[in-house]
Image (tube, grey):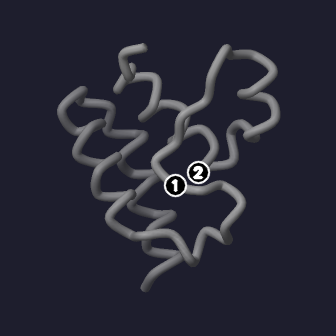
Amino acid sequence: MKLNEHLLMNQTFLVLTGKETLQTLMENHQGVNLLYNPNEPLCNIDPAIFDILIDFYVELEEYEKCQKLVDLKRVLFL
């Protein structure tokens, strides 16, 4: 099965920002892939995950998502 990068990034964004839970994603999709372990506290995840997502959404010109990620990263790591 081929990895769907767009789905991976969107699912990670939704769980990371609290718009969806892992459980609701699992109920609504055949599979869930995330860039991080959602069972770990957010402050323990690699901050580079935010950079990966921000770069992805900049390419798509989805700047509102970028801003949410920048704000969340600032709260968690600065």
Decide: few, some or many residues near mark 1? Use Cα within 10 Å; few <14, some 14-19, many ≥20. some
Q: Nearer the viewer, residue 33 or 11?
A: 33
Tell me which residue sits at (67%, 14%) in the image: 30
Question: Is 12 situated above or below 78?
Answer: above
Amino acid residing under circle 2? Leu
SS assignment at label 2: helix
Residue 74 location (% of width, % of height): 44, 74
Task: Tell me the element at label 1.
Answer: loop
x, y percent for residue 75? 52, 75
Image location of residue 14, percent across then percent down: 59, 38
What residue sits 58% from the left and 77% below the top? Answer: 43
Q: Amino acid at mark 1?
A: Tyr
Pick the residue in front: 72 or 40: 40
12 over 77 or under it: above or below: above
Q: Is residue 37 left or right of residue 77?
A: right
Q: Which mark is residue 36?
A: 1
Contact flag, marks 1 and 2 (Cβ < 8 Å): yes
Determine whether, in the image, residue 33 is placed left or right of residue 30. Answer: left
The dot on residue 16 is 2
Between marks 1 and 2 in the image, the one whose residue lies nearer the viewer: 1
**Which residue is painted at 51% across and 64% down in the image?**
72
In the picture provided, is 55 more to the left or to the right than 76? left
Q: Residue at x 54, y 34 (%)?
A: 33
